[in-house]
Image (cartoon, helix red, strand yellow):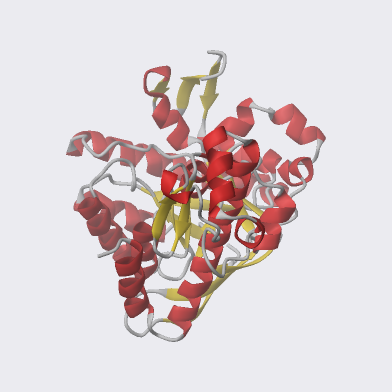
């Protein structure tokens, strides 16, 4: 197994840390937030503008890309990098969460997942091996194993069964990756499961610690549990997962969850929140979320946030942004998206600076007090 991660500094007052991910399409400084590009595009953004903000790693979705544009198209274009004109790193999830979300349209077994497309009802099967093959065709720099994602209200027996299937699938995915050899150029990550049971979380984390994966994700969080449950099981699991590899929590995008993850030594996270909220006219600032549809902004000549370098803040007023969002103009959502992604990139720069100066705990406290007005 090739080592792809090095820790460059540990905060002396918390488990927060700085690191460098060495990936096929360049290095990524951690902790890192990843914008989500479900269908091979970050909605409302030119890839060159995502790059200009500073991002070197974005996320795509295996399930959606498998269905559209499909593997034949991706193969013909030599993968998603070429097809979408993105020259930096790509992480693709396994599709497990999307299949989990299909509910009545899927059936999970030891073999894999049989599901119906949400687009046309056509029938498909994802096996651990097939998901590796799909991500090989996509050209993923980081590829996730197929796993069983579970809701927070199942019993111990069901959670244990799902975890054991996830472990079996992980071993099969790993074996298949080895069989592919140099054909598979990406880095395959395992996913810790175990639902909200400490004994299962411990068993799953220890299982993946022994596996030949270059990185490990902590799965099954931010799936509808309470904030207290999230914090408890994030902390519990992070204490067990090896610190020698990059650690990734999927699907977290609010500042409180991101900072909680960083404090627990998590290196990577992603979420659609920043872009989805932007399209609905909500933008992030250090003083909280601004809802642009509100009439209070109608005559406001100031920027969304003073000091922000995005196009909206340097060229347009809050009043104009309010006007575009109210009238449903496409440009409004696009500018708000650029702002939110710029905001999160700058937030991660501030986080990394605070860790470097051994003051992350005070940064987190002060930031959250201002953002949430507490």
Quadrant showing the N terminus = bottom right
Q: Position of residue 371 (x, y in %)?
A: 36, 63
> Where on the picture, by quarter, is residue 160?
top left
Q: Is residue 354 above or below residue 177?
A: below
| Residue at the extreme top | 121
Q: Position of residue 217 (x, y in %)?
A: 43, 54
* Residue in the foreground of this view, choosing between 239 and 362: 362
Q: Position of residue 48 (x, y in %)?
A: 74, 54
Quadrant showing the C terminus = bottom left
The structure residue drawn at horizontal position 39% and vertical position 74%, both measured from the top left corner, is: 16
> Where on the picture, by quarter, is residue 289?
bottom left
The structure residue drawn at horizontal position 45% and vertical position 26%, both measured from the top left corner, is: 113
The structure residue drawn at horizontal position 48% and vertical position 66%, both measured from the top left corner, is: 245
* Residue in the foreground of this view, choosing between 216 and 82: 82
Left or right: residue 27 compared with residue 193: right
Residue 236 visible? The answer is: yes
Callout count: 0
| Residue at the extreme front | 299
Residue 91 visible? The answer is: no
Q: Position of residue 65 (x, y in %)?
A: 63, 33
Left or right: residue 221 compared with residue 51: left
The structure residue drawn at horizontal position 40% and vertical position 21%, both measured from the top left corner, is: 107
* Residue in the foreground of this view, choosing between 115 and 190: 115
Q: Is residue 209 above or below residue 355?
A: above
């Amino acid at each position: 197994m090739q080592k792809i991660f090095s820790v460059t500094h540990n905060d002396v007052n918390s488990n927060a840390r700085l690191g460098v991910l060495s990936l096929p399409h360049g290095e990524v400084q951690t902790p890192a937030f990843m914008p989500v590009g479900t269908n091979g595009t970050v909605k409302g953004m030119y890839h060159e503008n995502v790059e200009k903000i500073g991002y070197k790693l974005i996320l795509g979705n295996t399930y959606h890309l498998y269905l559209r544009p499909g593997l034949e198209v991706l193969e013909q274009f030599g993968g998603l990098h070429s097809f979408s004109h993105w020259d930096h790193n790509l992480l693709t999830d396994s599709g497990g969460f999307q299949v989990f979300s299909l509910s009545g349209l899927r059936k999970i077994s030891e073999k894999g997942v049989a599901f119906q497309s949400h687009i046309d009802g056509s029938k498909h099967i994802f096996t651990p091996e097939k998901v590796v093959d799909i991500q090989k065709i996509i050209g993923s720099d980081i590829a996730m194993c197929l796993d069983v994602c579970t809701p927070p209200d199942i019993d111990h027996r069901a959670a244990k069964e799902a975890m054991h299937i996830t472990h079996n699938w992980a071993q099969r995915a790993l074996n298949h990756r080895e069989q592919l050899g140099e054909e598979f150029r990406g880095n395959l990550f395992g996913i810790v499961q175990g639902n909200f049971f400490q004994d299962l979380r411990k068993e799953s984390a220890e299982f993946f610690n022994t596996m030949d994966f270059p990185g490990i994700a902590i799965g099954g969080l931010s799936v509808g549990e309470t904030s207290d449950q999230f914090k408890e099981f994030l902390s519990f699991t992070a204490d067990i997962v090896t610190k020698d590899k990059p650690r990734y929590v999927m699907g977290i995008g609010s500042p409180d969850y991101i900072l909680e993850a960083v404090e627990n030594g998590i290196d990577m996270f992603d979420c659609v929140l920043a872009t989805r909220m932007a399209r609905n006219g909500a933008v992030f600032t250090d003083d909280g979320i601004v809802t642009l549809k509100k009439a209070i902004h109608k005559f406001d000549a100031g920027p969304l946030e003073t000091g922000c370098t995005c196009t909206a803040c340097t060229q347009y007023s809050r009043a104009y942004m309010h006007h575009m969002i109210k009238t449903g103009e496409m440009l409004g959502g696009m500018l708000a998206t650029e702002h939110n992604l710029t905001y999160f990139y700058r937030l991660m720069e501030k986080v990394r600076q605070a860790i470097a100066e051994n003051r992350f705990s005070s940064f987190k406290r002060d930031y959250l007090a201002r953002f949430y007005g507490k």
